[in-house]
Amino acid sequence: MKKFCIFIVFVLFVFSAYSQIDAGPDTTICIGQSVVLEGSGPGMYSYTWTSVPNDPSISNPNILTPTVTPTDTTVYTLEARSVSLTNQVINGDFEDGNTGFTSEYTYSPGANGLWGEGTYAITPDASFNHNNFSPCNDHTTTTGNYMAVNGAGQPNVVVWSETITGITPNTEYEFSTWVTSLVASSPAILQFRINGNLLGAPFTASNFTCAWTRFFETWDSGSSTTATISIINQNTANSGNDFALDDINFNAVSYFYDDCVVNVRDIPTSTFELPAEICSVDTAILTYTGTASLTAIYNWGFGSANVLNGSGQGPYELTWNTAGLKTISLMVEEGCESALTSQSINVKQSPVSQLTADATSIPYGTTTVLHGYMDGNPGPLNFEWTPNNMLQDPNITDPETVILENTTLFTFTVTDGSSLCSSYDTLTINIAGGPLTILSLEALPDTICLGESSDIEIQIDGGSGNYTSTWTSDPPGFNHSGSESVVNVQPAENTTYFVEVTDGFSTLPPQSIKIVVLHLVEITLNPSYTLIEAGETAVYKVDGLNNLSFQWQLSTDNGINWIDITDNSTYSGTTTNTLTINDASVDMDSYLYRCFLDGECSPIYSDNALLNVVMAPDVIGGINDNTVCEQQTISLAFDINNFIDIDSLHFIATYNKSKLEFIDITNINNEISDLEFTNSNDTIYFNWSSDMGVSIPDGNIFNINFLALADGQTDVSFSNSSIIRNDLGFYPSLSLTSSVITINPLPLMPDQVIATPDSLNVLDEVDISLEAFGGSGTEIIWSSDSCGGDYIGNSNPLEIFRPKKTTNYYVKYQNQCGETECSSVSVKITEDFIFAVPNAFSPNGDGKNDEFGVVANGEIDFFEINIFNRWGQLIFNSNNQYEKWDGKINGNDAPMGVYVWKVFYQFRAEGPYSESHKDTGTLTLVK
């Protein structure tokens, strides 16, 4: 608990000390000044100042308050080094005696126990242990212990050593000891060592006895967690080398940092530019040329100057009321104060000038007298007039002007010949009135339509004001004279009008203006009524004179409302003289069209043009596909749709005469009962016409009859030359569908039939293959006993099981057109049975002759076998001719020997081979 409390106190102390480390406040100085850094911190710390950038002017980097004189803004860092109060050495003050450490020297306590070299003792008085040693007190108190040593002359011998645990990695430690000489001669030379590595340089005890001196080195623990710290002897002298150690410490070291900034400001400059001299009527421009910023404080001393403009840094505009030598001064403050700068300016007196006139406003074409006045010292004074060409004599102070026709500004300038300063005065002579002038001449409007009028306006200025205008025209016809400013004209063609103006004193040359007369729009061709069939194109055309554009319009409500139409998929040429309507539909029937002809004068509409669109539906006809057998008659129904108001038709049908034979046309519709037709080679021509249109409901209008000559496919098609017309004179689109006639062939009887095999024994368990050759049809039919007998299959060849008796087989072909007669073949069956019984077997499991049974070449209708042992006992019985005896009795192997068998059998139940048989014999069972 005691150690824990000490640790808590130490931590609080370190934290408190760290919080007390202060590099002081940031400060600002002017370049060249010095400042004392105001560092503070605990007195037991050691301190070091560093700086960025490096400042060599630090008076003492190891005190808290050094003086610095930086030349640039500098960051100063105060480093505080704190050695922990916790000594990790056990018994470092030797108050616990000879414990807690080791030594390669011999421990020799007691009176005069240190006379031998390489010995030591823990003692409060070394003279007790060696009567030649000084009676020194310990380092800390006057009564405590210390380690008294009689050193040997052998280097690298451990005088004192201890292993420290609980080392914190990557931490700096301070290893220190207090040393004093016990004999003045040959003082001790010692060196620190940690973990076997020498630390720092050897250190030497004082030549004076009982003069305790502290020696220390620092060590970075790196990754170590333990440290064996030692003090070793490095003195090789055999005499002397007698010393004492006390208060050995091994302490952790901590560092604390704080910064402060010394801002170094440049001293601003206070230079400025000022003219050396000016005239009193002039303005001096004062310009700052120093290094300070706009935000600096500028302390100007302007003296008696008038400040016309300027603030802060300037520039300034200055004038003075009096002549003489004037002074301007400036001191600038921008953190630092600049030097005071002063400049002088010589203000020279300007002469006096004044300008008046007999009259400042005169009539146009008159004169006046100007009067110039001047005064000033020291002189002489000179003057100048401008513009001098507007004066009759510019070399006098009271000149008369020339005749003035325009307002004129005159300037009278006076110059002192000594100071070369000038002054001037100005005066404007205003001119009233002016020369006779036509200000404007315009026609409103200058372009008119035929029959309209226009106003010509004239504006006149100057002269006497009593104006007379005389008007004429080209071509001639308009003449007028008067004082009015507006005349109205109504030309019938393009006309130029001339006017001549006089004020009674002056007459101006004639001026002219032209009025353009535009002609009215006229229509020379109107669009006309149009009748078309749905899907066709309608064209409307219009022509006109004096128009600039065309716009076709549409009305769908009999002319009540009209809309402009634009080019699209239906309309084209909507802004030309020709409108084209593409693919007209019946919905457009009774639409009205007109064209708007626009021009510069009197636009006009064309006459309305009616569009009638009639529907002539496509006529669709033809024959459906059909199927027929050879040598049969087929009647093909010709159906038609949309037979509406038809007044004539012309059909052309073609066929293949090798496949079909034309017979006639039948079932003709009553509406076209006078239909005419002719057959020529492979072509049939149909013609019909009527005085009025005929309509027939959709359906059949006649039949074409043919005889099918040969199998295959053939077409009955209609020529593109086939046409149809309705009573409106239109030719509807005619679509005729051709017919595909499929002629199926008659079936053909097979030429030959073969049975494989065609003769076999009744006991042969085999299939028979029946195969037909030649003939044709969609299906082959096999039967037995007769052509219409029992059906047995429809494949070729046909596989069947052999019959039980001799049998005739028949085959024929059939298709949709019928069936053929039969061809036949006979299969002969003979009966020859085989029956045998072996006399020995060997049921030993070798797969050879392991079972006993009968042998037959066919199925036996009745069968029984019995096997007896030599004592007459039944050991095997079966009614299955295929069941064998395996040589076992009740599951056990039968003994070798002779056995008796009896067999009862009958090949057929009735008829031939139906006799009963009984055979007896013996068999031998061997192994």
Image (cartoon, rainbow, N blue to C red):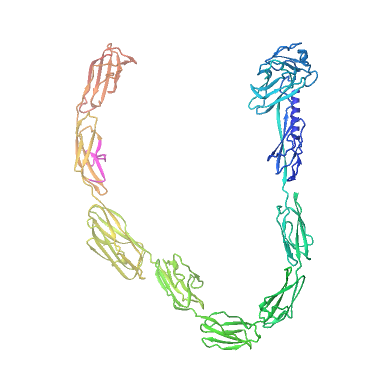
Q: Quadrant of the N terminus?
A: top right
User: Which residue of the protein is positioned furthest toward the right in this rendering?
Assistant: 142
Position of 764 relative to 527 (above/below): above
812 or 911, which lies in front? 812
Quadrant of the image occupied by residue 244: top right
In the rendered image, residue 790 lying in the magenta stretch gets the answer: yes
**Residue 647, percent across and down?**
33, 69
Regarding residue 740, the answer to whether it shows in the image is yes
Q: Quadrant of the C terminus?
A: top left
Quadrant of the image occupied by residue 459: bottom right
- Image: magenta residue range: 776-799
Regarding residue 786, the answer to whether it shows in the image is no
The reply, left or right, for residue 557 in relation to residue 86 is left
Quadrant of the image occupied by residue 715: bottom left
**Residue 423, percent across and down?**
73, 70
Position of 300 relative to 754 (above/below): below
351 or 738, which lies in front? 351
